[in-house]
Amino acid sequence: MMDDQSRLLSVKNLSTHFFSREGILAAVDGVSFEICRGEALGIAGESGCGKSVTAQSILRIVPSHGKIVDGEILFYQNGGAPVDLVSLDWKGKEIRKIRGKEIAMVFQEPMTGFSMAYTIGNQIMEVIRLHQQVNEAEARRRAIEILQRVGMPKPEQTIDAFPFALSGGMRQRAMIAMALSCNPSLLIADEPTTAVDVTIQAQVLELLKELQQEMGMAMMVITHDLAVISELCDRVMIMYLGKDVESAPASELFSNPKHPYTVGLLKSVPELGEGKSQEISPITGSVPSPYHRPGGCPFHTRCPAFIPNVCDLQAPPQVEVAKDHRVRCHLYVQE
Ligand code: SF4
């Protein structure tokens, strides 16, 4: 059990819904997890499972037709009493002090994180000056230092480059530099390697890992790619249709997956070094429309272990199958 000193974020029963003419979409549906200081948590699942909306809820940047309808997001700042981020005005001073300074985000596509009209230096310096009492010259010095730290070539010159003039890999490094410029205690990386080509992916992962260890910050890595999790994370949470279906330390989850969805995800990716002869079996069917969510266990329409009249009727409770290893599946419910 985590103590209050090491606890950084505690999300309890979070539900974020979207309201539209098609109906109500429960993008995040009663999710709970914790992140301690210096720890890396990976959140994985197919597109539309609620990973990114979980991050948006933490930063309070949920799009306007969405709303946090239940739950708490407790953020433990500097050993003080926790702040419930859900209770803050999303446009207010308090959340703006936390967003970017205490909790920063690296977006999937760096083009969306930067304005094309300003140099990367201007944008990094703006973040620094928003959160720290320093003059322009000092902000520029710090921006060059952080660009150097993320391995940007010739940072004294690159600082004056516009985002569109950089390669995809360099833009992602600049985005990471901007996120790290205020030394956050939590970095949220949303699909950090999806928009860069394969040769750059390994470099970005290596960079994030190095920086996390060097700066002692916690990380929440959102990805559909389990290889990214195995590279970077201490713990994993698997999501399906807005539910946290399984969570465990990364080594435990990869060696002893319990939920049929996690087992399916692991079977659907090739293992490094296993050669071309290995069997890869994708999960059958596709994720149902979140507007027509199946009753009972949301995975029952695709599950090879489906128990008729149980899985389609009752939502499975969360069960602890081993220390810190929790699963929502009827197969593990003891009578
Ligand atoms: Fe499959 Fe039933 Fe477990 Fe859902 S509860 S994952 S349908 S066995």
Image (tube, rainbow, N blue to C red):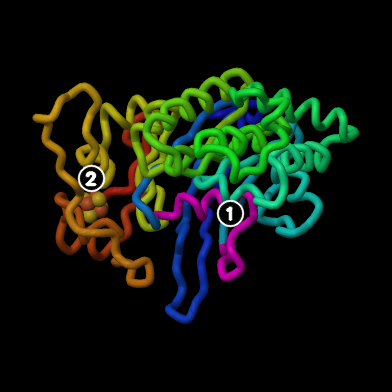
Q: Tell me if residue 55 is in the magenta stretch.
A: yes
Q: Is residue 290 left or right of residue 186?
A: left
Residue at disc 2, CB closer than 8 Å to ligand 1: yes
The quarter of the picture where residue 250 lies is top left
State the SS at label 1: helix
At 59% from the left and 60% from the top, the residue drawn is 62
Report the amino acid beneath label 1: Ser
Q: Nearer the viewer, residue 190 or 60?
A: 190
Query: Is label 2 or label 1 in front?
Result: 1
Q: Nearer the viewer, residue 125 or 231?
A: 125
Q: Earlier in the sequence, mark 2 or mark 1?
A: 1
Q: Tell me if residue 323 is in the magenta stretch.
A: no
- Inter-mark Cα distance, 2 to 1: 27 Å
At 23% from the left and 29% from the top, the residue drawn is 271
> Disc 1 marks which residue?
57
* Image mark for residue 201: none
Residue at disc 1, CB closer than 8 Å to ligand 1: no
Q: Is residue 288 left or right of residue 85?
A: left
Can residue 34 be seen here? The reply is no
> Disc 2 marks which residue?
260
Can residue 70 be seen here? The reply is yes
Q: Position of residue 177 (x, y in %)?
A: 64, 32
Q: Nearer the viewer, residue 334 or 30?
A: 30
